[in-house]
Amino acid sequence: MGNTATGLQENIAALLCYVLGWVTGLIFFLLEPNNRFIKFHAMQSIIVFGAITLLGIVLDWIPVIDVFMVPIISILAFILWVILIVKAYQWVYFKLPLVGDLAEKWANK
């Protein structure tokens, strides 16, 4: 357990990185300059939910695909969101494939 700039426990701050997707990820990434655990979860949230947000915007431009893909992506994003919140709360350094490595690299610069 390390110190946090927000005064929250590390696992609570890491959990909060995912609550509003990339928005809270960005907030905690900026608020926690030294805590590697929180910065990792914040960066992973920014990458994952930023990509999902961009994918949703792109799919909105393709009406036929939009009807089928957006509900599927939304359900999968919700499941992923719950898993990431639970893992962060459990103090797990849960790295998603590809994204986790990027998050770890970019969070520790």
Image (cartoon, rainbow, N blue to C red):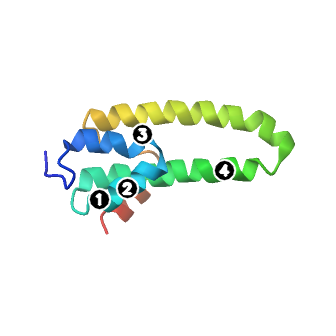
Which of disc 1 and disc 4 is earlier in sequence? 1
Q: CA distance from mark 3 to mark 4?
A: 19 Å
Which label number is shown at residue 19? 3
Dot placed on the residue nearer the N-terminal end, 2 or 3: 3
Q: Which residue reaches farthest bottom?
A: 109
Please name the residue that numbered disc 2 is placed on. Answer: 27
Pick the front one: 47 or 104:
47
Which of the two discs, 4 and 1, sits closer to the camera? 1
Say what amino acid the circle numbered 2 marks: Ile
The secondary element bearing badge 3 is classed as: helix
Q: Is label 4 in a helix, a strand or a loop?
A: helix
Whole-percent x, y for residue 75 in the image: 60, 30
Instruction: List the residue tagged with mark 1.
Output: 31
Tell me: 61 left or right of 15.
right
Between 9 and 99, the residue placed more toward the observer is: 9
Quadrant into which the N terminus falls: top left
* Position above or below: 23 against 30: above
| Residue 100 seen from this side | no
Residue that mark 4 sits on? 55
* Front position among marks 3 and 4: 3
